[in-house]
Amino acid sequence: MIAFGPVPSRRLGYSLGINHIPAKTCTYSCVYCQVGRTTHMPLERQEFYPVEQILAEVGQKVTEVAEAGKKIDYLTLVPDGEPTLDLNLGKIIRELKQFGIPVAVISNASLIDRLDIQQELMEADWVSLKVDSVDEAVWRKINRPHRRLSLPIILEGMLAFKQKYPGKLVTESMLVAGLNDNERTTRQLCNFLLELQPSISYLSIPTRPPAEAEVTPPSPEALQEIIEICSEQVPFVELLFESEVGDFVSTGNLKEDILSITAVHPLREEPLRAMVSAAGGTWRVVEDLLADGSILTILYRDERYFFRRFKKSGPKESITQSF
Ligand code: SF4
């Protein structure tokens, strides 16, 4: 299936996904990739699916959604591989415009130095470029790129693209424990983001089973430090800590459930409230955990995130700066 969804997305609203690249055809083999290890790593662009087939599937979905009385906010090229490897990328973006819905592309940026790809992406309304690290050694460890790719060339390509792109450019950085979660890599990343000046720089963490089992999100302490550094330096950073609490099953001990979930990934207030109420509890249990220092809360752009605190050192004040 090429067209899937639409699914609610924090970045793009109600987004219809378009998977126009065969699974695991990518220029990277990121350690955190949810699709598993890359099995086909070309640098040459090629045709994968006929444009007519893509348009027919998207058209059918658009009709179904309209008949259901719903609205699609974005048609999003978000394949299980790298979208810019598709030789038809420009044509697909252009043809998708016939539906009158903004088009988004989520790319790993590895080929962004190429002028043909820059030109094709110019026609998209929203482009996301990946930048997990601007340190070549760290980039090689996290993204495990094709051996002929070069990080300085990619970063130059991103800067050149930003200069001419009229749409909304965002970046996304995945934070991985032991790789890019230290002060040095964070400051390096912030400096690059300040130079690039995207509309928004999203920070995210692995929350679903990654390609490599040993890949984990940074500890709450490391995350807190990263957030504090970014808050001082980069005004357009946003957290994209999606928490999958839809599958939450109560073990009968709400306190333990909150501790175990927040130990794995931060929870936003809204899903945490939903979780508490689904378990028949009250918000008092969260207040008690905050009061005894077991969890802490960070206010970020008017949204509260709850983290597990591993070093129990008594009640702590919330970090309340807005950035
Ligand atoms: S760039 Fe995306 S699809 Fe490619 S390996 Fe990384 S996470 Fe997976």
Image (tube, rainbow, N blue to C red):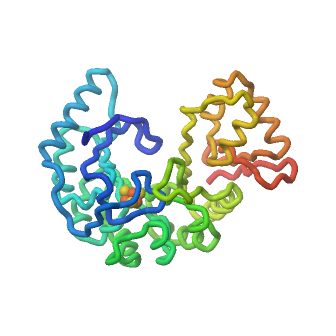
For residue 241, above or below residue 256 = below
Name the spot of residue 19 as percent of width and height, x first. 28, 46
Does the image show residue 190? Answer: yes
Tell me: 34 left or right of 122.
Answer: right
Name the spot of residue 145 as percent of width and height, x first. 38, 70
106 and 233: which one is in front? 106
Residue 249: image quadrant is top right
For residue 71, above or below residue 109 = above
Q: Which residue is drawn at 40% across and 42% down?
A: 12
State which quarter of the image contains the C terminus: bottom right
Q: Which residue is drawn at 72% across and 42% down?
A: 259
Name the spot of residue 193 as percent of width and height, x first. 49, 66
Name the spot of residue 300 as percent of width and height, x first. 63, 48
148 and 64: which one is in front? 148
232 and 178: which one is in front? 178
Residue 303: image quadrant is top right
Tell me: 284 left or right of 38.
Answer: right
Q: Which residue is drawn at 62% across and 59% down?
A: 218
Q: Residue at x 56, y 61 (%)?
A: 176
How many dots with numbers?
Answer: 0
State which quarter of the image contains the N terminus: top left
Which image quarter has ligand 1? Answer: bottom left
For residue 96, above or below residue 142 = above
Tell me: 82 left or right of 268.
Answer: left
Does the image show residue 169? Answer: no
Tell me: 90 left or right of 161.
Answer: left
